[in-house]
Image: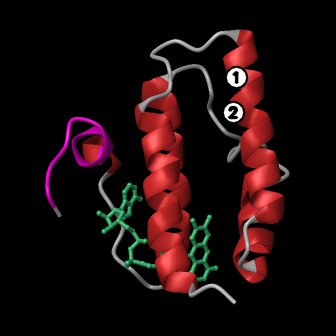
Amino acid sequence: PPDVEELGRSTWTLLHSMAATYPEKADTKQQEDMGGFLKLFAKLYPCWVCADDFQSWMAHPSGRNKPKLGGRSEFGWWMCEAHNEVNRKLGKKEFDCRFWEERWRTGWKD
Ligand code: FAD
């Protein structure tokens, strides 16, 4: 089975990179595509406990954790919050989401 930590690091790189290259303003089709991707991703992610928890988090009955897909800045922020939810669960430090673009788009070394 995949190494959950290595898989996680690689996957966050993919997910935040997808946010970083998301259109500044997404049209309906782009929003549907990303929404569909996230839904399937959360179902198929090959760490099953991770996938279950992630699906439940996204589907919170209040609707507060639904992906925000209108454009890059809100989507990037949402992805950062999703990652922070996992960070909290694992007892890791939370990331200050004001810096997500520096980390994942415009670049800095960590
Ligand atoms: P990672 O958490 O992998 O982060 C990589 C880099 O991203 C960090 O070095 C930092 O620069 C940056 N970063 C950190 N937080 C943020 C943020 N909020 N926003 C933007 N950038 C950030 N592991 C489990 O053991 N149990 C689980 O249930 C679990 N669920 C997961 C669910 C998903 C959807 C994913 C993608 C991963 C999950 N993981 C889970 C893996 C876990 O999140 C970590 O990837 C893994 O523990 C390795 O952690 P790390 O400390 O190397 O850094």
Instruction: Tell whether position 73 is magenta.
Output: no
User: Dot 1 lies on which element?
Assistant: helix
Q: Which residues are magenta?
A: 100-109
Classify mark 2: residues with Cα within 10 Å, few (<14), some (14-19) or many (20+).
some
Count numbered badges in the picture: 2
Residue 82 placement: quadrant: bottom right
- Please say if 45 is above or below 5: above
For the residues labelled 1 and 2, the Cα–Cα distance comes to 5 Å
Residue 98 placement: quadrant: top left
Residue 59 lies left or right of residue 83; in this view the side is: right
Q: Quadrant of the N terminus?
A: bottom right
Report the colour scheme: secondary structure
In x, y percent, where is residue 75?
53, 34
Residue furthest left as drawn: 109
Q: Which residue is mark 1?
A: 31
Q: Residue at x 47, y 80 (%)?
A: 6
Is residue 56 visible from the viewing direction of this image?
no
Q: Which mark is residue 34?
A: 2
Seen from the viewer's position, the closer of residues 99 and 45 is: 45
Residue furthest front as drawn: 1
